[in-house]
Amino acid sequence: MTTDTQWPLWEVFTQKKQGAPHEHAGSVHAVDKEMALQNARDVYSRRNEAISLWVVPTEAITASTPEDMGSFFDPANDKAYRHPNFFKTPGAKF
Amino acid sequence: MSIKNLTEEELEKRFHDRIEKGEIIEPKDWMPERYRKQLIRMMSQHAHSEVVGMLPEGNWITRAPSLRRKAVLLAKVQDEGGHGLYIYCGTETLGISREEMLDGFLTGKAKYSSIFNYPTLNWADMGAIGWLVDGAAIVNQTVLAKCSYGPYSRAMVRICKEENFHHKQGYEILATMMKGTDAQKQMAQDAINRFWWPSLMMFGPSDKDSPNSGDLLKWKVKLFSNDELRQRFIDRTVPQAENIGIKLPDPLLKWNEAKGHYDHGDINWEEFYNVINGRGPCNKQRMKQRRDAHINGEWVRDAVVAHEEKKKSEKVAA
Ligand SMILES: [Fe+2]
Ligand SMILES: [Fe+2]
């Protein structure tokens, strides 16, 4: 029916208010970064849901895989001493 | 434990345990092929419905009775386009391309909600759609926001926030007309007479005839059956109708104290299947409008690509 391609995919991150982190909102298709930003605004911030937007080419993102879930995060498992409640501090108030 | 050396059976068992525990499935997680397929079917149909849904209301933007109503309707229709986009991008995470989905849609292979194959004959229909059609959508989507697939559930959370505006603006249109002249009241009543039953059909076939429900319930994609959600919609809509003096066109609609629900008359399922299978009042027109829009937008998409290619070749030259 057409010779269209769907254009590259971009992941959209929105910051809800000043000082807040940017959070993943979804994705858009766009040929370049300007268009990606405009589409992200139209799709993910029609009611001032964002005061700042990031768009990142999806292919530029490297993610851990679910199969790694166990082993990849293992090194943190046996280090309870990284948490403050590991320590005994008799009587003292913090 | 690595999942790499588990058998298909063990993986499936592990998947069901996760679902049972109420865990959320994410795109890269292992999932049964049937789960993926059913989700693709259901989510893409949902996305197509949002997009087709722009047509019956778009029909009245230029004829809205005031600038306020026009701005509101324009914003609502734009939201529906946005809903389509949220869900398309959620569906893409299951490994189907946007192109493939659009192709299914434009060739008529994929279905969309039967409600959008009914005509919008006058302004009161904008009220009926906002109140009933978006009202039914809210009931469906609020539950889907808790479904087991992460991207679908997150898209639904976003959509639900916007639907309340759609719902209330529709109700406001009808409430205003019901305080107007006799002709206006009649117009509002006529719109409800036409949209009530098709709105009930939006929840899909009765439980005993719903072929896909079993799996979807088991996988917690659906959390309630079609009939349960339909009942929920009826129960919350009847008092809203009474509140503005509009009659719902069902002589059997009556509060049942023992059940704690409204009883209602039988739905004309023959009509439902006719509309689903392409024989509704506007099926052909909707598909033609959708295809024409796609074809008429082609030069814009071509221009965008040509511009991008030109920029790239300039960069290489420089
Ligand atoms: Fe919607
Ligand atoms: Fe809506």
Image (spheres, rainbow, N blue to C red):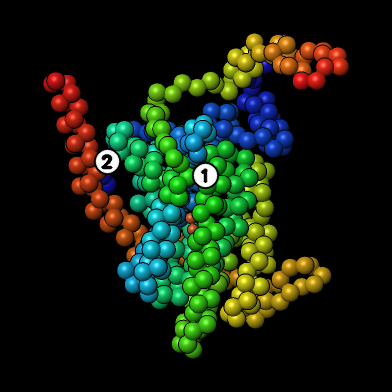
Task: Confirm if mark 2 falls within 8 A of ligand 1.
Answer: no
State the mark number for residue B41.
Answer: none
Q: Which residue is mark 1?
A: B155
Quadrant of the image occupied by residue A87: top right
Q: Is residue B310 above or below residue B56?
A: above
Tell me what residue is drawn at x 39 percent, y 40 percent.
A40
Image location (x, y in percent) of residue B278: 42, 62
Q: Choose between B178 and B22: the one closer to the eye.
A: B178
Image location (x, y in percent) of residue A63: 50, 22
Q: Tell which residue pokes out farthest to the left in this image.
A: B317
Q: Tell which residue pokes out farthest to the right in this image.
A: A91
Marks 2 and 1 sit apart, C-alpha to C-alpha, by: 26 Å
Q: Is residue A26 visible?
A: no
Image location (x, y in percent) of residue A43: 41, 45
Q: Is residue B111 above or below residue B271?
A: above
Query: Mark 2–mark 1 contact, CB under 8 Å?
Result: no
Quadrant of the image occupied by residue A66: top right
Q: Which residue is mark 2?
A: A4
Image location (x, y in percent) of residue B80: 44, 55
* Label 2 Cα crowd, 10 Å radius (few <14 / some 14-19 / many 20+): few
Q: Choose between B138 and B102: the one closer to the eye.
A: B138
Q: Count the numbered circles shown.
A: 2
Tell me what residue is drawn at x 86 percent, y 17 percent.
A91
